[in-house]
Amino acid sequence: MIYLQTENFQIDISRFGVSLSEESDLFTDSVNKNYSLPFVIEGDAELLAKLGLVHLENSSDVEIQIPCRLILPDRHYKANLFIGDIDGKKLECTITYGDEDLAVYDIELKNLPWPNIITDDLPMYAWSCSRKSWPSTAFNFPMVWKPSIAEEDNYEAFEGFINNYRDSSYVTNEIDNSGAEPKYLNKNVMVPMPYLLEILRFIFAQEGKKIFGEVIDHPNLKRALYIPETFLEKFRGAEYQQWAFVDPIRQNIENNKAYSTYERILTPEVVGSYEIDYAINLDPIQARYFSFTIFRQDAITGEKTTLKKATSEKNRVKLDQKFTVNIEDKDVFDKIVIELILEDQNQSISDFNNFEYSFKGGRLNQFPNVFSLSNFVPDMTAGEYINLLKNWWNLDIDVQERYVVINFAQDSVLERNVRDHSHLEDPDKKFTHNTNRFYKLSYANGETYFYNKRGRVFSDLVDEGTEEITIELDVQPALVELNQGIMTAVAPEESSDIDFCLYDGQDENFQPTCSESISRSISLDEIGEKFWEKWLWFRIHSKTFKDSIECSTSEIYDIKELSFKYNEKQVIKKISKKFQSEKVMKVEVESESF
């Protein structure tokens, strides 16, 4: 019997002709979901009530998702029951099941709840990180050569290195006041580079799962850092203020309503342009009355001149704008007043507004004191990231209830439990040899790795009739070269999905550089030899079997086990189980001998 079970009901679905399909992740580019083919449930009034469907008779284009558990004879899974068209008491259903079906997979990495990192002194904080390794720190600050930043606005003085380290400290930017006008010397940018394994750990942590396995303990993979395209930036000119309105400075009552006034007074001291960058986000209740004004107040007469005004009632307010105030000689020391009036609030509004005021005559990047990795992770979903690592490092990812065990496929497959299915052999078995396979692995920077029945080869020319299998990895390492007398990683000129470097702590000169020898450890040559070669040899020297078996529903066919049949161990690639009755099922199995 096969049961679907929720808090409200349990139903045996074996009598409805359910077909369950599973595909091993070892043979695909992605972590696969287990699923059923569509089937129809005959529901009585009691079942319809428990499903909450009593008022949905004869509905189409309906998709209802019900979390449940799928209970099979040999094991049970988390599952989701999807109900589609409803015809009277007939419900069209499908199921997805197994821990591979995780909600976090669909979330963009940047939208995960990365914590804010708060520090009083970013360069000093980065120095403390540079002496640590993962998992003691989630990111690090190695020196990486990227001279193209000097071409960007405000970075004409950039010295070529991200996380530039000199004279026992990370370089800070400065103002040169030796001339008639100040010069803003942005010599350095700071970039927190997350460890690749930290991103992986954080993804599964959202599902309450811890990660273990060979990959987590691999010394070189623990050193691998993602090189972001962005950097930490906090511009400050000769005058700079940042604030959020918290509490009102005064309150007044009009027509029996209490109003709160929030105010900030700014006093420009030199001729030039001043920028007010503001964000206000209030819901309709907070903004049941909203008045926002920027005005100039004459320093002598007190006369007010409105520069910007916005008012509304009972509507959401979402402003994210910049406003420039130009100050001439006659305006110097005139006040710029920013005023916000709301109906009286029962809480602080500090989380719903932010203001920055700066002089545009010069821009100095003094580095923020608060940052989050949300701005420094690859531009992809969590599922896409896991699939990328899986294909790159040839991983076997076993997602369990509380843990995720991540090993190298070529090793872990040999340690799987073996179940004897020799009693289910087909005397008319059919199989094919796989010696005509030719594997091609490639990095985004053009590195390649070729493998066929003769082993590693150095040409992509193939014989007629050869089955080409291409694994394109949109990743690339940062080469390690000498620039300005410093040997460290060089950011690739053309970016890929993951540009990476390896960092193993400060060098003999106490600089946070990337060493050449360590960086070679996950070149494609090394990845192919260490993580792929044994696996490819197995795949090429295997035989593929396709069996169709009728057996008892209690027969155990687990895709995570090896099957022993035809006097050989086999890795199961695909299983389809069609439950013909409560006692009989038909199993379609595709497997490769090992």
Image (tube, rainbow, N blue to C red):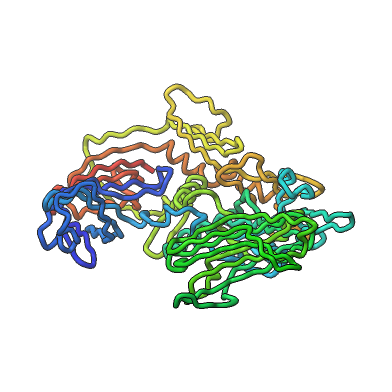
- Please give the name of the residue rendered at 50% of the width and 77% of the height, measured from the top-left corner: 253
Q: Is residue 51 above or below residue 442?
A: below
Q: How far across and down, in percent of the image, does residue 437 sit? A: 44, 32
Q: Is residue 466 left or right of residue 324?
A: left
Q: Where does the image place residue 326, in percent across and percent down from the top left?
A: 72, 54
Residue 183: x %, y % from top left: 82, 54
The quadrant holding residue 464 is top left
Residue 537 spot, x, y in % from top left: 47, 39
Q: Nearer the viewer, residue 114 or 155?
A: 155
Instruction: Write the residue at 43% across / 39% down.
Output: 539
Tell me: 419 left or right of 113: left
Q: Nearer the viewer, residue 67 or 450?
A: 67
Q: Residue 548 lies in what quarter of the image?
A: top left
**Which image quadrant: the N terminus?**
bottom left
Q: Residue 246, can we see it?
A: yes
The quarter of the image holding the C terminus is top left
In the rendered image, the residue lying farthest to the top is 464
Residue 508 in view in this figure: no
Q: Is residue 343 above or below residue 331?
A: below
Q: Is residue 164 left or right of residue 308?
A: right
Q: How many marks?
A: 0
Q: Residue at x 58, y 71 (%)?
A: 262
Q: Residue at x 47, y 43 (%)?
A: 535
